Image (spheres, rainbow, N blue to C red):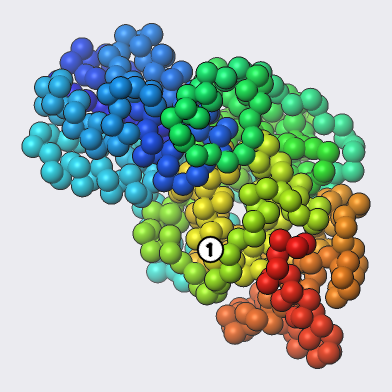
Amino acid sequence: MTLRLILGDQLNRQHSWYENNESDTYYFLAEMRQETDYTRHHIQKVVAFFLSMRNFSEWLKEQGFSVIYYQLDEENNAQDLIINLQQIIKDKGIRKFEYQLPDEYRLDQQLKSFCDKLDIKSEAFDTEHFLTSRSDLSDFFKGKKQYIMEYFYRHMRKRYDIMMLDPKNPEGGKWNFDHSNRKKWTGEPKIPEEKKYHFKVTEVVSMIKKEGVQTIGNIDVQNFNWPVSREDALAMLNYFCRNLLKHFGDYQDAMHSNEVFLFHSRLSYAMNSKILHPKEVIKTVVSYWRAHKEEIDISQVEGFVRQILGWREYMRGIYWAKMPEYQIANHLENTNPLPDFYWTADTKMNCLHHAIKQSLDHAYAHHIQRLMVTGNYALLTQTQPDEVDEWYLGIYIDAIEWVEITNTRGMSQFADGGVVATKPYVSSGSYINKMSNYCKGCAYSVTKKTEEDACPFNALYWNFLDDKRSYFESNQRMRMMLNLLDKMDRDKLQKLKERANKIINSPNDY
C-alpha cells in the first residue's frame, strides 16, 4: 500500500498522480492546527483553503481514488502532520510514502526529516505547477552580483515563446510596457461589477471558531466571495478576460477609496493553491488578447504576463536561493513595533485606513497598496521586519511564505539589502496622491511638511533617508535623493526629523 500526501496548496487536478487510479494507493489531506496556528491568518484565508481542500477531496473521490480526509474537528486528527502520517502508516499497513515537494521551507524540512526516519520507502515528486525548478533562478544568475528580474523575465519569455515574434524579438517592439501601466483612475472607464459567488460558509466558520482557531479580519458568512474549486477559478479567469483585461495594464497601479479590486483579476489565490496553472492562465489571457487586438492594447496584456511569468517565478526562485537565512534578514537594522492600527484600520491617515480596512474586510489588497501604502509606511517608520512579515503572511488570502516573504523582506522592506529591489521603495505623500484619491478628505494635508496637519509620509520620508543614508551612499539609484537631502536647509531638516520622530514614537495617535 502507498500513501500520498496532498498539502493544502497542492490542489492541482492536472498532476500526473491522477492519470491512473492505483487501487493500492491512499490520498491524504488534512485541515490541521499546525497550519492554522503557525501565524494568525485571516478568517477568509482559512475558510478558502478548507473549502478548496474539501472540493479537491470530493473530486478525487468522484474519479474513484481512495481518499483519507481529516476535517479540523475529526476525532482522529492529531492536528500535527507527522503524527497523523505515522498513525495512518501504521493503521493502513503502508509500505511506501509519497509526497509532492512543499513550497514552504518549514514543511520541506519537516517532511525531509520525517522521511529520513521512516523504515519504509519514500519518494518526493515535483508539484508540476511552476514554470521553473527551485534552482533555475540561482543557476541563471550564477556569478552575477544582482538578481535583476527584467533579465530573468526576458529569458522566460524566450524559453516559453510567449508574445515573441522570433527567438530574439518581443511582440510590440518592447519587452516591458511598465511606463504605460501607471494611470490614475478617476471614475472612468467604468469598472464592470465584480464576479461574485455568494457562498454560504456558516458551517465551516462555526467549526473554526468552535475549535478555538485564532483569526484576524472579517467575513460575510452568507456571501463568501472567492473561487474555491477549479470550475469557479476558470469562471473568474474568463470573466477577467472578457471584462477587465482591456484596462488592466493602464490602471494596475491605481488606487481608489470606492473600489476594492478595480481591474485586477483576483486569480492569485487560485494559482497559489494550484487550482489554476500559471501556464494555462497566461495562455488563456494571451489567446483572448490575440482574438481582440482591435480593442485591447498590448500594454494591457504584457503587464499581466509579466506579473506571472516574470515576477511570480522570480520570487519563488529567490525564496529557494536564499532560505533559510532570508527569514531573519534585517539589513537596515529596523527595530520598531508595527503600529496597532494595522490590525484595526483605526488611523486618521486615509490611505492607510482604506488599504488596511480593505485588507481586513476582503483579505485582499493589490500590489501597490501593499508596497507603497502599508509597506512604505512600515519601512519609513523603521518597523522590525519580523512584525511586518507576520502581518502580511496572515492577512492576505494569497499569502504563502514563498511569495509573501520575498515581497515583504525584499521588495517592500529592503531587509535583504538589495537582493530583490535595487533601491528601497519609499515615497512621500506625493506618490500616493499621484496614484489615488486617498488624499482627498484626509485629516492630513499632502502639501504640508512639518505642521501638525501635515501628511506623516512627508516628514517620515526625509527622516528615513537621513537616518539610513549610510546604507545607501554607494547605491547609484539613491544618489539623486541623497543629493537633495544634502542640499536641504539644516533647520528645515531638523523640523522634519522632529515631526517624524513624534510619529514614530506615537504611531497610534495619527
Quickly name the residue at label 1.
Answer: 385
Q: Position of residue 51 (x, y in %)?
A: 49, 23
Residue 267 in percent (x, y) is at 60, 33
Q: Residue at x 15, y 20 (%)?
A: 92
Image height check: is 159 above or below 292? below
| Residue at the image position 82 percent from the left and 43 percent from the top | 257
From the viewer's perspective, tell me whether residue 173 is left or right of residue 402.
right
Q: Residue furthest bottom?
A: 490
- Residue at the left extreme? 119
Confirm whether residue 424 shows in the render.
no
Looking at the image, residue 108 sits to the left or right of residue 356; the answer is left
Where, quadrant-wise, is the N terminus in this rendering? top left
- The residue depicted at 52 percent of the width and 74 percent of the height is 333
Is 4 rendered above or below residue 351? above
Q: Amino acid at mark 1?
A: Pro
Dividing the picture into quarters, in which one does residue 290 lie? top right
Which quadrant would the C terminus be assigned to in this image? bottom right
Q: Is residue 309 above or below residue 349?
A: above
Residue 276 place in picture, x, y as percent: 51, 28
Q: Residue 371 is drawn in which quadrant?
A: bottom right
